[in-house]
Amino acid sequence: MINYLKESTFAVNDVIQKAWGITRKHYFSIATLCFLMFITASASSLMAFFIKDVSKILSVVMAVIFVFLYFTINLSLFKYIFHLMDDEDNDVKIVDTLPTRQQIIRFLIATLYFVACVFGVYLVVILVAFPFIYTGINIDVVKNVAISVGIIAIFITWLRISFFPFFIIDRNSAPFESIKLSLAITKGNFTKILLLLLVLGGGYLIYLLFNLLHWPFVAFIVNILSSFIIVPLSSVALTVAYRKIAGEYKGDEHPDILHNIV
């Protein structure tokens, strides 16, 4: 177990180092795309606030437009990072990295599958816990255990299938196929991915710590540094991690779900 953790740590270090090299060389272009995603999300929230009492139909239409715009920028970011990894010497315009209409549609459908998988796992946990109500065990205990196990199951499921956008952009995979491939490549790599997320999320955890210590000025500085450095780095690191674990995958090109759950 200790050797496995050492190997996982070294693998995470390799991903972070490669991601930092790419981010440092192309920081402004990557940060620009991240900033556009932030602006889109913020504009969507402001628009929803101002027109919520004007017209519900208009509010829905604007929400759909902003969702499409946000996902388009997000997929463009991944596509741009793939270009930097594959052909770093030749420059490419951000406009040239826009995803195709088919990729956007596949991503939206895969997102629905993603949400269904997450809620499906939680529903299974609830159904398994339901018979214990009739065993004489305190209902509050059963409920609390079921909720706790459900949250853990949701997190594990989210982590296992969250690489589906990369398959759509990188291999133009079909929606459900991308979910299955994400589940397959993360089998045996859960610890590495978890360690990577902990490293990338370290800035936000430090921010929360300083908030709890009531050091608002220090927390503000940490938050700014996290927003301008960690966010772009995280996008690159996750893309690099995908390429690494996908490249090491030796399984079926069309995997099934049951053999890759555990």
Image: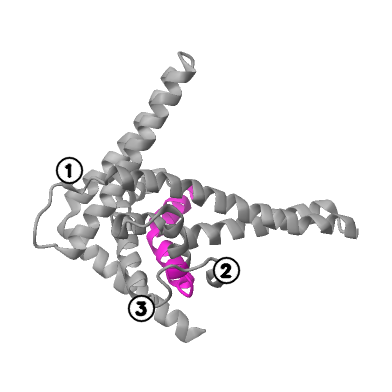
Earlier-in-chain disc, 1 versus 2: 1
Check disc 2: other Cα within 10 Å, few if <14, some if 14-19, many if 20+: few
Earlier-in-chain disc, 1 versus 3: 3
Q: Quadrant of residue 127?
A: bottom right
Q: Quadrant of residue 40?
A: top left
Residues 122 and 25: in front is: 122
Q: Amino acid at mark 3?
A: Phe
Residue with the most extreme right position = 136
Q: CA distance from mark 1 to mark 2?
A: 40 Å
Which residue does the numbered mark 2 point to in the structure image?
258
* Residue appearing at x 46%, y 86% in the figure: 3
Inspect this view and state whether residue 23 appears: no
Residues 197 and 135: in front is: 135
Instruction: Report x, y in % for residue 144.
Output: 73, 54
Q: Quadrant of residue 262?
A: bottom right
Which residue does the numbered mark 1 point to in the structure image?
95
The stretch of residues the image draws in magenta is 184-213
Instruction: Report x, y in % for residue 48.
Output: 43, 25
Earlier-in-chain disc, 3 versus 2: 3
Which residue does the numbered mark 3 point to in the structure image?
10
Q: Amino acid at mark 1?
A: Val
* Residue appearing at x 42%, y 51% in the figure: 207
Q: CA distance from mark 3 to mark 2?
A: 30 Å
Residue with the most extreme left position = 90
Check disc 3: other Cα within 10 Å, few if <14, some if 14-19, many if 20+: few
Inspect this view and state whether residue 114 appears: yes
Query: In the displayed structure, would residue 101 be above or below residue 3?
Result: above
